[in-house]
Amino acid sequence: MENIKSYVNQHKDRFIAELIELLKIPSVSADSAFSKDILKTADAIKSALEKAGCDKVEICKTPGNPIVYGEKIIDKKLPTILVYGHYDVQPADPIDLWDSPPFEPVIKKTKIHPDGAIFARGACDDKGQMYMHVKALEYMVSTNQLPCNVKFMIEGEEEIGSVSLAWFVERNQEKLANDIILISDTGMISNSQPSITTGLRGLSYVEVEVTGPNRDLHSGLYGGAVANPINILAKMIASLHDENNRVTIPGFYDKVADLSKEERAEMAKAPFSLDNYKKALDIEEVYGENGYTTNERNSIRPTLDVNGIWGGYIGEGAKTVIASKAHAKISMRLVPNQDWQEITELFKKHFENIAPKSVKVIVKPHHGGQGYVTPIDTIGYRAASKAYQESFGVAPIPQRSGGSIPIVALFEKELKSKTMLMGFGLDSDAIHSPNEHFGIFNYLKGIETIPLFYKYFTEMS
Ligand code: BES
Ligand code: MN
Ligand code: MN
């Protein structure tokens, strides 16, 4: 594919302009105020797939947000690649921490992105990465170089647990039949050291409510004599980790797949600077489970984190009150062999157990999913590796990620196919945070690398 580089070069301004248009639509799935924008985004992707050369594109209705499906089947005997991505984005809050409005994309240069980066919610996660595949298809179709069949499935509920996608996949096994699933919704080590994501963590997300007295009380008249649910919740949460920063829920680690010494030594070879890591986050010291490195703590080890905590008076000034209720949202990142439903149950039992009689506790499970590890002795991995080698001029390193894409394990179960995670984002791209961005270099490199994967995967199949 001699001319992919020149094609990208020739069309890059348009590629960037098209992505910017897509980023202007605030397709926030968590907030129903944006449901019109969700539909508008699905429409925009449908026409983008049609223009890029799909033969059949449809907007598939589900009980929730629609799924955009497209395909180009050139020969039933050739392999089929199923591209998955998501068009929904995380809420933009807290908006005042953005340097520019989240849905008015701007290009700015940064230290890590000297060629510029597009700043907008969804730039990296996942509109920018998903759109690389649309532009890669445009290239292959318009230059008559599509080597195999391709199907696209772009959903609008990834950030809220992919519930409708699970429903859709269970009902459309035949339609979605494929030889490999291809996803760009993860990251890589750096722009000079590409990596292929070989693992994702599972997730169990719960919400807890602690209720003390039946109403808010004067903290002088009642303080000291009744349980304060906020004090109790803080105590309960603090007890969920021990002095080694290990999770104290009985049975939590029972099924954790431990890595061998050799595997850990192999992992430690990936380039990583603890100093730079600390500097980038402006922290004196890192923190985590004793006996593990930073890269192990955020990929091969399970965790428990409070994501939000509230209750009582948080307005201006002081109000002397003991609130009736306290709340927290808690996520547990899981690793292979931990079952998310089992962990959710263990959490619930334990949390109810440690609550003193003076309060009532409700544990409400949200969504979750299984972790995933991809083998590297496959055609898919070898084809991806060769593609990166060619486009970056450097061999990629396999690396397990700490993030979660729960639907990947479900794909394997329902569609019996493996997934290749070819992510082009960087950890510093601030996904889910204010000032999310995606490097222009990364966007264009992705468009360049994807057709090479198609070519080598087809050749090796
Ligand atoms: N794209 C991310 C997951 C990700 C990012 C994996 C970077 C690896 C590297 C995805 O959109 C996401 O945010 N997933 C959620 C889970 C989901 C069930 C809400 C997550 O990881 O918090
Ligand atoms: Mn994503
Ligand atoms: Mn996300």
Image (cartoon, helix red, strand yellow):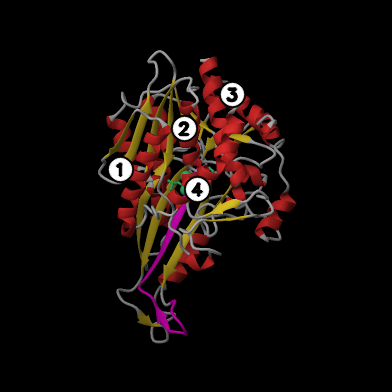
Q: CA separation, marks 4 and 2?
A: 15 Å
Label 2 SS: helix
Structural crowding at the residue carrying mark 1, measured as other residues with C-alpha within 10 Å and reported as few (<14), some (14–19) or many (≥20): many
Q: Nearer the viewer, mark 1 or mark 4?
A: 4
Q: Is residue 282 left or right of residue 317?
A: right
Q: Which amino acid, by three-letter code, is at mark 3?
A: Met
Span shown in magenta: 314-334
- Which residue is disc 3 drawn over? 1
- Which residue is disc 4 drawn over? 17
Q: Which amino acid, by three-letter code, is at mark 4?
A: Ala
Q: CA separation, marks 1 and 3?
A: 35 Å
The answer to whether residue 338 is visible is yes
Structural crowding at the residue carrying mark 4, measured as other residues with C-alpha within 10 Å and reported as few (<14), some (14–19) or many (≥20): few
Q: Position of residue 353 (x, y in %)?
A: 40, 55
Q: Position of residue 241 (x, y in %)?
A: 55, 55
Q: Which amino acid, by three-letter code, is at mark 1?
A: Pro
- Which residue is disc 1 drawn over? 66
Q: CA separation, marks 2 and 1?
A: 23 Å
Which residue: 70% across, 37% down?
A: 268
